[in-house]
Image (cartoon, grey):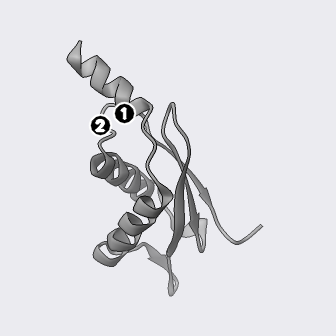
């Protein structure tokens, strides 16, 4: 029952935008970003837009550079960094192209 209560608390957790962006910039410095034909993915901005489940909005330069494997890695990195283990984390990706 303790584990259920821990997951429920994480389900309702909100992470500040400043903390998320600080983490994202350090993540981008350490990780090799996906690239294609000379263009490299740039993570511009991240914010949590919803709890239950935790949903994050990520603004990038070109979402076509973001493949499924890197998106899964990014989702797992957010879950590990902010303690969302056992909770589904959603990512919404948007780029500057309309």
Q: Picture coordinates of residue 18 (x, y %)? A: 46, 63
Instruction: Tell me if mark 2 has few (under 14), some (14-19) or many (20+) residues whose alpha carbon lies within 10 angstroms of its own.
Output: some
Residue 98, label in figure: none
| Residue 84 sits above or below residue 98 on the image | above
At x 28% / y 74%, what residue is drawn? 30
Q: How many marks?
A: 2
At x 23% / y 12%, what residue is drawn? 1
Residue 85, label in figure: 2
State left or right for residue 95 relative to residue 48: right
Question: In the orientation shown, which residue stands out farthest toward the right?
Answer: 98
Question: In the orientation shown, which residue stands out farthest toward the top?
Answer: 1
Callout 2 secondary element: loop
Question: CA separation, marks 1 and 2?
Answer: 8 Å
Query: Which quarter of the figure has residue 88?
Result: top left
Q: Picture coordinates of residue 11 (x, y %)? A: 42, 31
Q: Is residue 87 visible?
A: no
Name the residue nearer the viewer: 13 or 43: 13
| Residue 74 sits above or below residue 42 on the image | above
| 1 and 2 marks in contact (CB < 8 Å) | yes
Q: Picture coordinates of residue 15 (x, y %)? A: 43, 49
At x 43% / y 72%, what residue is drawn? 34
Q: Is residue 58 visible?
A: yes
Instruction: Tell me which numbered mark, 1 or 2, is placed earlier along the sequence.
Output: 1
Name the residue nearer the viewer: 61 or 22: 22
Callout 1 secondary element: helix
Residue 10, label in figure: 1
Viewer-side label of 1, 2:
1
At x 28% / y 48%, what residue is drawn? 80
Q: Picture coordinates of residue 90 (x, y %)? A: 50, 42
> Looking at the rendering, in which quadrant would you find the C terminus?
bottom right
Instruction: Tell me if mark 1 has few (under 14), some (14-19) or many (20+) residues whose alpha carbon lies within 10 angstroms of its own.
Output: some
């Amino acid at each position: 029952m303790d584990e259920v209560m821990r997951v429920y608390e994480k389900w309702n957790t909100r992470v500040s935008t400043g903390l998320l962006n600080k983490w994202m910039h350090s993540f981008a410095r350490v990780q090799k970003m996906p690239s294609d034909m000379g263009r490299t993915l740039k993570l511009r901005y991240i914010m949590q837009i919803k709890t239950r489940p935790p949903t994050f909005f990520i603004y990038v330069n070109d979402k076509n550079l973001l493949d499924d494997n890197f998106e899964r890695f990014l989702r797992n990195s957010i879950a590990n960094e902010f303690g969302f283990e056992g909770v589904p984390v959603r990512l919404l990706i948007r780029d500057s192209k309309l």
